[in-house]
Image (tube, rainbow, N blue to C red):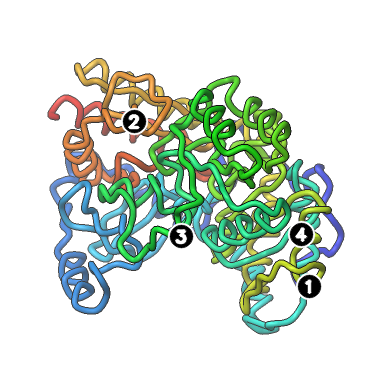
Amino acid sequence: MAGIGLSLPSNSTHRPAFSSSTPRSSSPRCCLSSVKMTVSVDEQKKTFTLKKSEEAFNAAKELMPGGVNSPVRAFKSVGGQPIVIDSVKGSHMWDIDGNEYIDYVGSWGPAIIGHADDEVLAALAETMKKGTSFGAPCLLENVLAKMVISAVPSIEMVRFVNSGTEACMGVLRLARAFTGRTKIIKFEGCYHGHADPYLVKAGSGVATLGLPDSPGVPKSATADTLTSPYNDITTVENLFNAHKGEIAAVILEPVVGNAGFIKPKPEFLNFLKKITKENDALLIFDEVMTGFRLAYGGAQEYFGVTPDLTTLGKIIGGGLPVGAYGGRREIMEMVAPAGPMYQAGTLSGNPLAMTAGIHTLKRLQEPGTYEYLDKITGQLIGGIVDAGKKAGHAISGGHISGMFGFFFTDGPVYSFEDAKKSDTAKFAKFYRAMLEEGVYFAPSQFEAGFTGLKHTEEDIQRTIDAAEKVFKDL
């Protein structure tokens, strides 16, 4: 099979590892990027315009609800004109007006090895020669499944789907089927996709737009959804006591990314593991964001806590639409056709998504990967927070590996309630000013940020320099 080895890759590198200070060599586009980046911040700001983006967005509003296909892209919480992207490469992106940005969104997480990676693109080109969709089994599914199973501690069997939302829908049905119970516990500010049962005190775009839930979701769909503040052990204990023998599962983002970046308290994940086991309920980690990002084995490897079930997405498709859920064999064998719980998908296991995922995970196995991500991300968030404090602003932040966030509040931030104390108006001003300086963060105070292997120390320093300038004028 062109470009793909069918044996499971070992942990040894298949090529020399990059240095700790400089990611691997880039394409001519990246070389052009480094030339462009020598332009001073002031020169870039003078030429900054969004005229073409404005025209395109105004046209889009007549064609699509709000002019976008996902709400946060409309810049409602930060104001100003959304940018319309033309191309991406490495750690940079270009809009249709020709503005260049250092990108800390990374397609909301998947671009961990950099946008438009040359090896991934070459492998996709070879795979496309055989077809773009089979609707039937292909060997590539076996390869990626073996890689996921060997990496993620909780997963003994896996089912591929097409999005994180679909993965979370499937895992909820599976948890209910396996336990014979209906109630679930989720946490305020944690977003598990837009399926009806999860749209209760959700994060992501729901938090950004200030919507407590969503019209169109019947009360019956959320009647079995119980909620607790994140990091709140007492409330979880009370919910289990009040609903003895009724709770099928507890689901959470082990590190919150959809209410901003929020870490679990040291005892929190171990407590959830213990209480679910004591009550014959299942513990589900939604690792759509954290999977293969905090560590090769995800948050469960990083924290040393193994859930019963896990959802994945983003990175395992290398930027193509993908999702997955998996867990212990005895649970997964409930899924059709092995068992009675039905779930299906025409494009599941798509050969292009499998190819991109395989080559992305291979790259992440190289020595020094997560050490490099942790180093540059620590430099980034430390520099931004320090710059903000020196300029007299209330700001706090943190990171783990290649995931980070900061809030315009003194902190600490342990829950969505804490996050909502942030000065969102100040964040909006900061965001728009940073955009003009050529830095692209997620357009919401309530979204995590991401770094990748193609972010250089020059990218990081330029971002900190821009932040220092913006904070002084904020």
Gap in angstroms between the C-alphas marked 1 and 4: 17 Å
Gap in angstroms between the C-alphas marked 4 and 2: 38 Å
Q: Earlier in the sequence, mark 1 or mark 2?
A: 1
What x and y, as percent, mark residue 413?
Answer: 39, 25
Between 224 and 386, the residue placed more toward the observer is: 224
What x and y, as percent, mark residue 220?
Answer: 44, 60
Q: Nearer the viewer, mark 3 or mark 4?
A: 3
Q: Which residue is mark 3?
A: 221
Are circles 3 and 2 on residues that touch, CB within 8 Å? Answer: no
Q: Which residue is mark 2?
A: 417
Residue shown at the point (26%, 22%) measured from the top left:
388
Q: Amino acid at mark 3?
A: Ala
Q: Which residue is mark 4?
A: 145
Q: Amino acid at mark 1?
A: Pro
In the picture shown, does residue 153 fall above or below 422?
below
Q: Nearer the viewer, mark 1 or mark 4?
A: 1
Q: Amino acid at mark 2?
A: Glu
**In the figure, is residue 277 to the left or right of 114?**
right
Q: Earlier in the sequence, mark 3 or mark 2?
A: 3
In the picture shown, does residue 114 fall above or below 96?
above
* Neighbourhood count class around disc 1 (C-alpha, 10 Å): few under 14, some 14–19, many 20 upward: few
Q: Nearer the viewer, mark 3 or mark 1?
A: 3
Gap in angstroms between the C-alphas marked 3 and 2: 25 Å
**In the figure, is residue 250 to the left or right of 411?**
right
Residue situated furthest right in the rendering: 7
State the SS at label 3: helix
State the SS at label 2: helix
Q: Earlier in the sequence, mark 4 or mark 2?
A: 4
Between 356 and 302, the residue placed more toward the observer is: 302
Q: Which residue is mark 1?
A: 337
